Amino acid sequence: MTDGPPGHGHGAARPVDPPPAPAGLPTPGVTAAPATATPAGATAAPPVSTDPAHPETPPVPPGAADHGTAGAADHGTAAGGGEPRQRLHPLSPVLQGAKSLVVVIAGLSWSTLSRVGFGWFAVLVAVLALGATVLAVVSWYNTGYHIVGRELRVYEGLLWRRTRAIPLERLQAVEVVRPLLAQLTGLAELRLEVVGGGKTEAPLAYLSVADAARLRQRLLTVAAGMPGTQVAGATAPPAVGLSAGTTDPAAPPTDGEPAGRPLHAVTNTDLLVSQLLTPQAFLLPVGVAFVVAQFLSAGSWSFIAVASTLTAMAGVLLQPVRRVLDDWNFRLARESDRLRIHNGLVETRMQTVPLERVQTVGVTWPLLWRMKGWLRLRLEVAGYSGGEADDRNRPDRLLPVGDLVVGTAIVDEVLSGVRLTELPLTPPPPRARWLRPLSARVLGAGLHERVFAVRFGLLTRQLALVPYARIQSVRVVQGPAQRRLRLATVHVDTAGGSGAAAHDRDLAEAWTLAAELTARAHTAHRAG
């Protein structure tokens, strides 16, 4: 048994020695994890070859023989008589050079402009931008990709050649992303999510929208044709409506693939109003008035004062503005055992979430949203990169804003049979108020037929739903104050990392709950 995290203000937490197991219950162990750390539903990848001169791979599955037209084809062919290597779209160096130009201008400070003058500053920017464009052209010319057997191989580099071989049996999803410049030029970027990857693999930037959709479908088809492999987005079931009032009125997706069964479309009006009902929006006028009053009283309106004020305002507004841009025209659809999510204004995204990889469903009721009956749904998905600096590529958005009826219907799609209004949540014992005088009445935990449910949060009410089949370990932790009150916290860990915690339960109840969670997790793993 390993030490748990600190006991949330009750002193350093330490594991608790279990009392004798109650009659009829299994011995409450600490771990309920399967023997392997591989996320549920994943398959182990066999050794692969990264030498382009020896592509010894099994035959391509049926349906994957079509070479397609993704990208501009190289004149050479793969060793062993495979398909020719493909190049990215010819406009790719232009877009890469434009991004480099923005970085260069941002990197050159105002002090540089004041020292050298506008003319030399423009020359410096032009030279650096030209150099970046030349490097982008050289990189484009030496970059290629093709499918060899069960691998997607990506070749890049001039002085140091690099070949990446991505086993398609480990493929979880292929995302089509269109930043603003790509939208203006009719291009798209392909990003691959692989089981166990530390970051997004082999981003192919850029392809035409049609070529990106064809290559994405082909990769998923090849991967889905392998024994024991389930990949999101490989097939499309017939479209069937969910219920009245939840069909998608938005325009059809632009990725060139079937939209699936529409579940819900968030109106942009609700999205804007929801971000206005945030603490940042309410506190912004107060902060601006305070800063302006200070400047007026001091009589100082220098450049530094104005710049600092604008920077502070931009920092306050950044989060709600980014949420509006990211979730603009949000649409959710269902394809067999996966979800399709379309969202974005400046950067449009099409993501596929395999339901078998969902670890946790989180429900959030922000304080100001509760007067309108709104909530937000988020997912925790295993197999997606967690080391990215930009977390917007994580497919954790399930519903940016919606009412209880819509939220309940969507949760039932992800976790069949789970209804938000019918969860068996019980509060902690009354003595927990000594530790949480304000939030103890909000806490709750319970065992549903399919999930472990935990409620917490005072101002921002939250609910975590963890399917038993996704539980990796169970821990019972006590802090010093909890030991005096004979309370304990039960932690449930998942492959995604966050899990859930039932805070300040009676000690005997905590061990009973841990034993039951362990038994249900083992049963669910064996059934799966």
Image: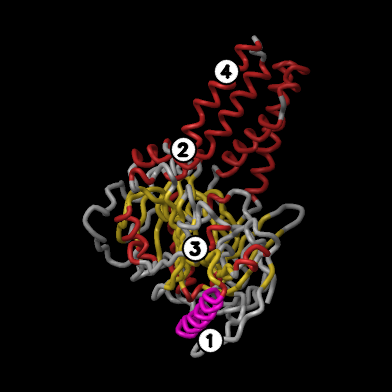
The spot of residue 45 in percent (x, y) is 60, 76
Report the label total: 4
- Residue 184: mark in rendering: 2
- Residue at the spot of label 4: 292
Decide if residue 117 is on the left or right side of residue 221.
right
Tell me the distance, in whole angstroms, between the alpha carbons under discs 4 and 1: 66 Å
The residue that appears at 33% across and 60% down in the rendered structure is 408
Sequence-wise, the earlier of marks 4 and 2 is 2
Nearest the viewer among 408 and 67 is 408
Q: Are marks 1 and 2 in contact (CB under 8 Å)?
A: no
Tag of residue 22: 1
Q: SS of the residue at dot 3?
A: helix
Tell me which numbered mark, 1 or 2, is placed earlier along the sequence: 1
Disc nearest the viewer among 2 and 3: 3
Q: Earlier in the sequence, mark 2 or mark 3?
A: 2
* Mark whose residue sits in front, 4 or 2: 4
Where disc 4 sits, the SS reads helix
Which corner quadrant of the image does residue 239 belong to?
bottom left
For image coordinates 70% across by 17% down, the residue present is 118
Up the image or down, 85 lies above or below 495; here it is above
Give the percent coordinates (x, y) of residue 471.
53, 73
Q: CA distance from mark 4 to mark 3?
A: 48 Å
Label 3 CA crowd tier, 10 Å (few <14, some 14–19, many 20+): few
The answer to whether the residue labelled 2 contacts the one labelled 3, judged by CB atoms less than 8 Å apart, is no
> Mark 3 to mark 1: distance in Å?
23 Å
Span highlighted in magenta in the image: 508-528
